[in-house]
Image: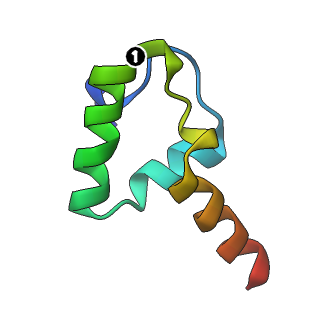
Amino acid sequence: MEKKELPPHPITLEGAEYIRTMTPNQKKLHLMAIQKLGSSYFVERAKGFLAWKASRKAQ
């Protein structure tokens, strides 16, 4: 994972796994969020992450 794909603060292992499973469009939105929101962006609080996490628990 490239440095520019990560927010300026540490992320959890689960957050890193979610980033690896993103579609190209999700990845674009993720990168935009990092650029625009900076340290206010937490991937673990994003709706997409929460839905992904819930779907993993349901399996």
Frontmost residue, 35 versus 8:
35
Which residue sits at x=35%, y=26%? 34
Which residue sits at x=40%, y=16%? 38
In the displayed image of the protein, which residue is found farthest to the bottom?
59
Q: Is residue 9 above or below residue 23?
A: above
Residue 1, horizontal then vertical, whole percent:
34, 37
Residue 24 falls left or right of residue 47: left
Residue under label 1: 38
Which residue sits at x=30%, y=64%? 23
Q: In which quarter of the image is the C terminus?
A: bottom right
Question: Which color scheme does this rendered protein use?
Answer: rainbow
Q: What element carries label 1?
A: helix
Q: Residues within 10 Å of mark 1 (few under 14, many from 20)?
A: some
- Number of numbered discs visible in the structure rendering: 1
Amino acid carrying label 1: it is: Gly
Residue 3 visible, this orientation: no
Residue 16 falls left or right of residue 3: right
Residue 54, horizontal then vertical, whole percent:
71, 69
Q: Is residue 54 above or below residue 39?
A: below
Residue 53 falls left or right of residue 16: right
Residue 19 visible, this orientation: yes
Residue 46, horizontal then vertical, whole percent:
55, 45
Frontmost residue, 38 versus 3:
38
Q: In this view, does 1 lie above or below 52?
A: above
Which residue sits at x=59%, y=29%? 11
In the displayed image of the protein, which residue is found farthest to the right?
57
